[in-house]
Amino acid sequence: MRRRNFLLLSGSGLAAAGLAACGGSGGGGGESGGGSEVEVFTWWAQGSEKAGLDALVEQFEKDYPDLTFVNGSVAGGAGSAAKDMLQSRLQAGDPPDTFQAHAGLELADYIDAGQLEDVSDLYDEYGLTEAFPSDLVELLTLDDEIYSVPSNIHRSNVVWTNVELLEAAGIDPSAVPSDVDAFIADVQKAADSGVTGLSIGTTWTQVNLLEAILMADLGSEAYNGLWTGETDWNGAEVTTAVGHFEQLIALTNTDRDGLDWTDATQMQIDGTAAYSVMGDWAVASFQQAEWEDGKDFGYFPLTGGEAIFGFLADSFTLPVGAPNPDGAKAWLDTISSQDGQLAFSLAKGSIPARTDVDTEEFPAYQQTAITSYAEDAISPSLAHGAATPVAWLNEISDATSKFTTGASDVAGYQEELATIAEKHASA
Ligand code: GAL
């Protein structure tokens, strides 16, 4: 089987260490094999995500003044609308010049379908092999060929708090709940004070919550085993996790299915929701609202005792048949350069994938992410393409939506998750 095991990735030695040096690998050319326009396909269409993309575009325009960035973004968090649209375009032979894809098994889908060009020569040309942690490059490699270039690393398993609402509910905002039961007790307390306990959005944000609970309840080893067939989806630990998921969903806003992550975070900023569980792109929204870390908002990983970093990385590709491959390579140069990685992560709430970016000026939250990525156990994100191919994630999403809309019960949901795993683990 060609599918590689995500779990080559380990925390140690992967620190986004602070080594100052300046300049990317170059740019400045503006040479283009297919005109001056470069269409970049992402789902960073609004709010703080758009601000992150804008930071990259600014750097791109500095590096390649003769090229014109064309924004091919499709709104919808986690690519919830973009991925289907991209698939139709790829199948119709109408690829953008470059598109966003997660490192890990999501990328394997595109590789297996023959939709991506090998970009290993760019790793040599731009000096990227040494710049990225080797375990991360491994996730982008198949049969010795490298298929994308990472722009950043995000963490998926973070609880965000509205400090004022916690205080009003009699919860110490600086205390980190020791396990999921303790967290649920606090969310219940917040809900009892008259606000939404936990704000959440549509299906993918619910899957993001599920994965954070699974990581906390099972621990990294057993969680990681869910994707390799080593952990039994019918087991008691998963039953506990699914039960916790049910309890937490009952404490969320009932209009969730019509909302994206941005709306759920906005509920906290508006003072109507105490908690959310979301990837750390959420910090960029708090920062954009000029909320003060520790005074207005707080954060901690959802934990069952073990320190786990829920891992995902955005990366960019060179699709087969891209109209402007040279323009795409220029984009890949900018997003992989020190300047590009610094500008992007500062705006996006992520941390650089390169290990040689000076991260001293990063805000407090990102400093915690840098430390945690270096020291904690690493677990691949389900909702963000690291743990499974898209087909497996889609089926989990459908089962989750069935459950949260009341069309299945806890036992039925767990059974369905187990059946899906059986099918994909043996695929
Ligand atoms: C993730 C992506 C992040 C962020 C998030 C919300 O899948 O990796 O960069 O954009 O979705 O849309």
Image (tube, grey):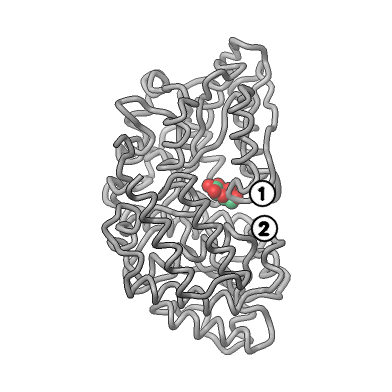
Q: Quadrant of residue 137?
A: top left
Q: Is mark 2 within 8 Å of ligand 1?
A: yes
Is 174 situated above or below 79? below
Q: Position of residue 286 (x, y in %)?
A: 63, 61
Residue type for callout 2:
Asp
- For the residues bearing labels 2 and 1, Cβ distance under 8 angstroms: yes
Q: CA distance from mark 2 to mark 1?
A: 7 Å
Residue 90 position by quadrant: top right
Element under label 1? loop
Q: Could you say which quadrant of the image residue 265 lies in?
A: bottom right
For label 2, the SS is loop
What amino acid is labelled 1 in the image? Gly
Reply above or below: 108 against 195.
Answer: above
Q: Position of residue 224 (x, y in %)?
A: 32, 57
Q: Is residue 104 left or right of residue 59?
A: left
State the residue at coordinates (68%, 40%): 74
Where does the image place residue 56, in percent across and percent down from the top left?
Answer: 60, 35
Front residue of 210 and 130: 210
Residue 398 is tagged as none
The one of 25 and 409 positioned closer to us in this rendering: 409
Can you identify the residue that label 1 sits on? 76
Q: Earlier in the sequence, mark 2 or mark 1?
A: 1
List x then y, in percent, for residue 207: 52, 61
* Relative height, residue 331 to residue 398 (above, below): above
The circle on residue 260 is: 2
Residue under the point 55% across and 81% down: 187
Please report the residue visible at 51 percent of the width from the left and 54 percent of the height from the top: 395
